[in-house]
Amino acid sequence: MAEDMAERVEALESILVEKGYVRPDALEEIIATYEQDVGPRNGARVVARSWTDPAYRDRLLSDATAAIAELGYGGRQGEHMVALENTPDEHHVVVCTLCSCYPWPVLGLPPTWYKSPAYRSRVVLDPRSVLADFGVTLPEGTRITVHDSTAEVRYLVVPMRPAGTEDLDEEALAALVTRDAMIGTALL
Amino acid sequence: MNGAADLGGMMGFGRVVPEPEGEYFHADWERRALALTLAIAAAGRWNIDMSRHARESLPPAEYLGSSYYAIWVKGLERLLVAAGLVGADELEQRRVLRPGEPVRAWTADDAAAAMAAVVPYDRPVDTPARFAAGDAVRTRVLHPTGHTRLPRYARGKAGVVERVHGAHVLPDARAHGPDERPQWLYTVRFTGRELWGDAAAPDLGVTIEAWEGYLDPA
């Protein structure tokens, strides 16, 4: 099937280019944007700032779209952002059971597993079994909330700052923040 | 519609396979599928809700049997044919049989600007919000034949309004025509037990975004 899709998409692209509907330079620009420029390092900087700047953290939790824009991130699939802060009491996990809604400006394009039927079907029903697939076990006493992105609201999970990182600067902290931790399928 | 895309609560798909950061595509055609789907939006013949509906209304066996970007390609082909931009015969024969319609096509700069543009989905409305944070609500039991964003697992369930987002365009309407019919949008929280019964973890919570028309007071 993969080979058939390659031929099918190649034919589709040549039809759309020949008809004047899309330009090859625009296609290259879009691919470069999402393969090189926009990705989870953006979200990691947001998280690191919220760990180090309490006023920024408050703005992030009250109006995430504006707070994320302060760091220069925004655009398609990030129009209505909400930040969810993990605490010792509550762990957040994000999904889109209906399709693949995901906060592109801060996390880039979603990983394959986020779009997979396995994740979308099971994480709302039994999220701890999904976390187990990632090798993650939540501490005893931490409740779990799954956020199904059924509208144009997009979620960024703010993981808990790891212990022993008091001496690290913002850049070093950002390097600790993983994509999966900002979806809720990893702990730091 | 009650389509195959509405996956919440289904079983039997196996384990979730983690993936390293930075792996966005697994074949070059997936890159092309993403870029074509985004770039053709410049033609202005459909919106994101129509685009989702085109994918999600694929026959269930075909939806579940297709990889993610294959679903995107099939959805895009359906939209192109429905809009009259490409003929089914042209897709079949894999070549151009007639000249294109005059539509706008992005340059590289246009595409970059469009990816960075913030085009919000909230709209001003005259009516006040019916619900406030903390209100008890129950989702309606709806089985529309058209597009909807109310998952099957969350229909007819009691929950609590957690957040009021303003009025947002209604996908149920906008997937089928130009009328946006904005409605107040809420985040509603359910207990796992309400959704799944006594076998659910007692400390599980699930939230969805629900438009006002999906909700009744409880």
Image: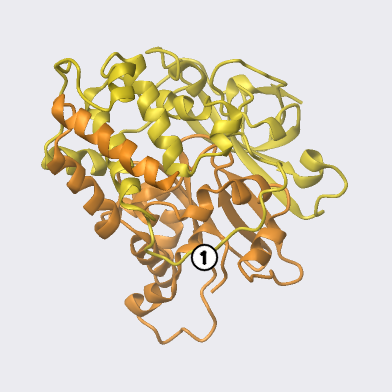
Chain colours: A orange, B yellow
Task: Say above or below: B84 vs A122.
Answer: above
What residue occupies the far right of the structure in this picture? B198
Residue B190 location, quadrant: top right
Q: Please, is residue A89 above or below residue B38 in the view?
A: below
Q: Nearer the viewer, residue A102 or B19?
A: B19
Give how far across and how far down residue B96 sits, in percent: 20, 22
Q: Is residue B38 above or below residue A188?
A: above
Q: Residue at x 29, y 24 (%)?
A: B93
**Of residues B97 and A70, which is closer to you in this image?**
B97
Q: Is residue A19 left or right of residue B189?
A: left
Q: Nearer the viewer, residue A83 or B74?
A: B74
Residue B48 relative to residue A20: left or right: right
A108 left or right of A89? left
Name, please, the residue furthest toward the front: B93
The amino acid at mark 1 is Ala
Q: Position of residue A157 (x, y in %)?
A: 51, 58
Q: Position of residue B160 (x, y in %)?
A: 70, 37
Please state the total of marks drawn on the protein image: 1
Whether A69 is drawn above or below B218: the answer is: below
Look at the image and tell me whether residue B118 can be seen: no
Q: Residue at x 16, y 18 (%)?
A: B100
Crowdedness of circle 1 by 10 Å Cα count: few (<14), some, many (20+)? many
**Residue drawn 45% across and 84% down?**
A166
Asked which quadrant contains residue A89, the reply is bottom right
Chain letter for the residue marked with disc 1 in the picture? A
Quarter that holds the N terminus of chain A: top left
Q: Can residue B57 be spotted in the picture?
A: yes
Q: Secondary structure at mark 1?
A: helix
Q: In x, y percent, where is residue A68?
A: 35, 54
- Residue at mark 1: A181
